Amino acid sequence: MNERTMSMSSQTRNRVDEAMESATFVGEQKSASVSAKEDVAASTSPQQSRRVLALRVTMYVMLCLLIAGIIVGSMSLIEKGKQQALEEEVERLSDDVMLILGSFIHCVSTQLSEVSTALTVQYTFNDSNGVAATELGQAAQGFPDITLPFFDERIQAVQPDVDLVFYTPIITSDVASKREWEDYASRKQGWIDEDLQRRGWAPINAEIPYFIHQYTGSIEDQDLNSFDAFAAPVWQFSPPPKDRSIINLDASTFPYTRQMIQESIEKKSTTNEPILSGSFDAEMLLQYAEAMNSTTPRTLVSMTVRKAFSSIDSSDTPEIVGQIFALMSWEKALDEAFEGANMDLQVDVKESCGYGFSFFLQGGKIVHLPSGGTSSFVLSDTQVLRTLDHLESCQYTFTIRPTEGTEVQVVPFISINATLSACFIVLFLMVVFHLHNRLSQGREAKLFATAQSSAAMVSSLFPSAVQSRLMAEVESKKQDNHRLMLERSGSMNFNAKELYDSKPIADFFPEATVMFADIAGFTAWSSMREPTQVFTLLEALYHNFDEIARRRKVFKVETIGDCYVAVVGLPEPCLGHAVVMSRFANDCLMKMKMVVKSLEVSLGPDTADLGLRVGLHSGPITAGVLRGDKARFQLFGDTVNTCSRIETTGKRDKIHISKETADLLNDAGKEHWIEQREDKVTAKGKGELTTFWLRVTRGKKDATAGIAMSASLSTLLSMSSRSGGDEISERHNRLVDWITNELAVLLRVVEMTRLASAPTTKKASDETVASLERASLASTMNTTPLKEIKEIIHLPPFDPSVRDLPGLGEMDFTLSLEVLIELRDFVNNIAMMYRENPFHNFEHASHVTMSVVKLLTRIVAPQLYSNGEEDIEHLHHKTYGIASDPLTQFTMVLSALVHDVDHPGVSNSQLVTEKTALAELYHNKSVAEQNSIDKTWILLMEGDYQHLRKAIYKTEDEFVRFRSVLVNTVMATDIMDKELSAARKARWEIAFNAELNEDPVTASNRKATIVLEHLIQASDVAHTMQHWHIYRRWNERLYNEMHKAFDNNRGASNPTDGWYQGELGFYDFYIIPLAKKLKDCGVFGVSSDEYLNYAQQNRREWELNGKAVVGSMKPSEKTDTETFPPPLPWSHLE
């Protein structure tokens, strides 16, 4: 039997396998009856076969029709989607265009407004101070006899966004006024040659027309008689006119200008809003400027010049004494607005005060359509109407229409119809398969019959043993096939090799521009900040950068620390990638300056000093997705590496570009944007490179940049409205606001703590507090703060009611407006009392204040600031009561602010040597520190601050604690007095190392007192325990201050001689031991480790490079400190 089986042909073997499979099926259907065989026989009839065939044909036809219907429906949906996408794209493009046009006009009007303000400031300044006018190189003037210095250089901040700018004073029509103006103009016409010389143009030997003359061209049927009351002669003109006949030409006889002047006079609004004229052919005006295209429509933008600024307390509108006009080209404006548009379209503009005009955008280039002309392309039915809002006078309506056949890429989507079609398909297939199942039953019956016959054949061929083995083999094959199907369908786990068998996702992009933007000064700045403050800055900056990137269609790749990486030219190609990236970089640079200035109020000093260092490079890039954990899109190639080198070799607040990027900008007609760097840079792996600086000449810029002005005028232009007219800088204001905010936050907590513990607190009467204030004020005349130093300051015991206080962010309690106003005024007056010292100045006081705030935030009660889980009572005892006493924290911040008030810029020993009145008053002990305390206290006790004092203390205990903490901590900043230093050292040893037999409360207060003194000591020299650059800056300022005193014969020796060795000793015997004490007291958490680490690092750096640093420090009379008015006189203390 086996021999017969081995000799079977392959055909017979296949038949046996089929028979075995059929036999297996038979084994599973052992219960089938004989009647089933009859059904099987019936199912095989020819009639049933015809019905099955007909049903199959019907099913195929219906499926084909269904597929055709789906294709037709899908095409219809796609076409509809394309049309909808086109409409949405045109809508989006129109919104962006209106936004950019509005920004364009806003930038022009802002610059004109600043020039108008400068004219008003100059008139106000000259009118009130004739001497200051002499500093400007002219006699005191009044409108209309005003000539603005450096007019052309100011206007260049607006160009090339406008073609020209001119200023016209308004002069009454009486003969005397006209003659006076004509005499003045004849005398002052020298400004034209001065502006020509600044531009490097040759002077013109010609005189201006002496008399005011009228324009003789068409005036569009306007009534001249209504303007007989005044004249508006053209005076200052930018660019400086080469044809002087434009000067003294009466602008009230120009087309459009006369109407704009009339509208300005008739307006009653106190705000200075821009007025736009209708579009017109500006050939008459352009002939006086450089050669320009005069065929495209232009519009005049006008701002008024008023005789004075509007007063908040007065409803009177200051008199209009002049008008500034800028000639704006619509071709330039629309070229910028449609930059990057990827479709051809026509823009039709209708205006309420003119005839309108049209432009055509083809291939990214704006082309003016002459009046009555049409484009050569068929326009689509899709159109969008937009109005340029918020404009005075003329209103402009834009109709934007793409060309016929314009398409945008449509992302596939599923509509309701598509969903219904899919549902219908599913239902139809269910019916088909149901019918197929019914037919399969007949097939199974037929298979059953065939299996029976096959089993009989196998039974006749093989004995039972071989039948069993064959059956087992077939079953095994079935199981293997089933397992293989499961593996292939994904039912089993994939291994790593299967994941990476597919092709990676990566592409090569031959043309792209990369930007690396790094925050200059960030490392040193962040070393003085809390982590939350660092992330506040980064989130604010990167959010604004992301918004600009979205608007400019720039792809943000990633952020690496404080470096922002972006690219243009991928994933979507962009022909003008270098131009787009240049504009993006410039926008980021401008936004950076705005954001850091606004954040300085909340993030503290030096925030506004941060800059942005930008590098651009163009070239090919490989980009793709690296699969695996945390996969992301990445850039690779030499272009990326070179861009990083370009950025690192750049300078702060500048855009550094490679030669490749500069060449692309030149090809794009932007050669005026770039300036070759004088020195070549050496880049790692690249050698010497020729690079360029980028300056995008558009948008809002500092109108006074690069203009030489007198110090008086510069100060006037930077006056802060909140300062009540004091001559202080914008930086000074931001520091005052920041300190006020920090103190106000702590005062809020003081008030909330009082409210929580009100039932157990006995409030003193107003008369009791007033008597304490009078006594303390009298003590400033009879005794000295030195005698008030206390060994132990008693802080309040733990109050369980503070557990119920909300977090600081959840507090709905606010300080009264009177308290806030008095608090800011007090801080401002303290700032004004600081002298112009290189080191001991208000800026250094702000730096010390920031360090105190940082250290306090590490120990404050968590439920007041972050709703932490740590038990407040445990924290109270751990920090010796400092954490739960907001009044002590408030006083510490105030002490940091006032500790160097009225510092004379020389040491206490020098004041004693000179036998000054202050030294005698304070008995030759801690002269500067005691003087600061007394002057601060006298100021606080003034009647202007009664609401502030009531917010600080309301009980006798609070008053005593406030005064004691203030005196002890300010006096602790005198580290040169040997007796005070020895006493402090002894108190530390007693508090932390001696074994005293005293109650726990007294021991805790003893430790709290000495910890507070060391806290402010560490903050006073915090620069030595911060980043090396911070230490270098303040160390050099201290050196300059001491050298200045030596030069003025107010110093015992030249500080240069022992500066290097003195700093080493200062670190070894004071700074590092002080940092270790901060760590040993266990109060300040990780800050103590941070301070100690920086101190040790700076000490090592100074030991290595200190001699070179001393050699590089050259004393100078001027420092980079702010210029403040002298301190208030305290005659009784002089």
Image (cartoon, grey):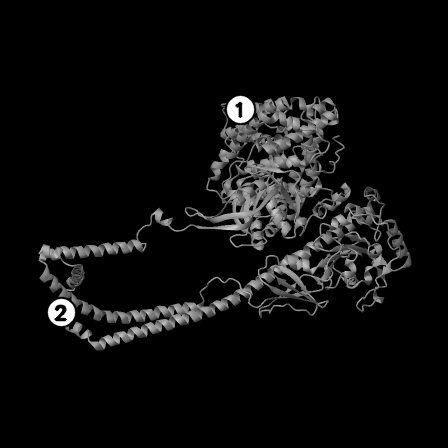
Q: Is residue 581 visible?
A: yes
701 shown above or below 287: above
Task: Find residue 1069 and name its label.
Answer: none
What is the secondary structure assignment of the residue under circle 2? loop
Depth check, front residue: 1003 or 761: 1003
- Earlier-in-chain disc, 1 versus 2: 2
What is the secondary structure assignment of the residue under circle 1? helix
Q: Residue at x 69, y 65 (%)?
A: 395
Indicate left or right for 631 with 123 as reference: left
- Estimate the x, y position of residue 585 in percent, counting from the top left: 60, 48
Tag 2 residue: 33
State which quadrant residue 394 falls in: bottom right
Q: Is residue 307 visible?
A: no
Depth check, front residue: 133 or 96: 96
Tag 1 residue: 990
- Estimate the x, y position of residue 960 in percent, counting from the top left: 61, 34
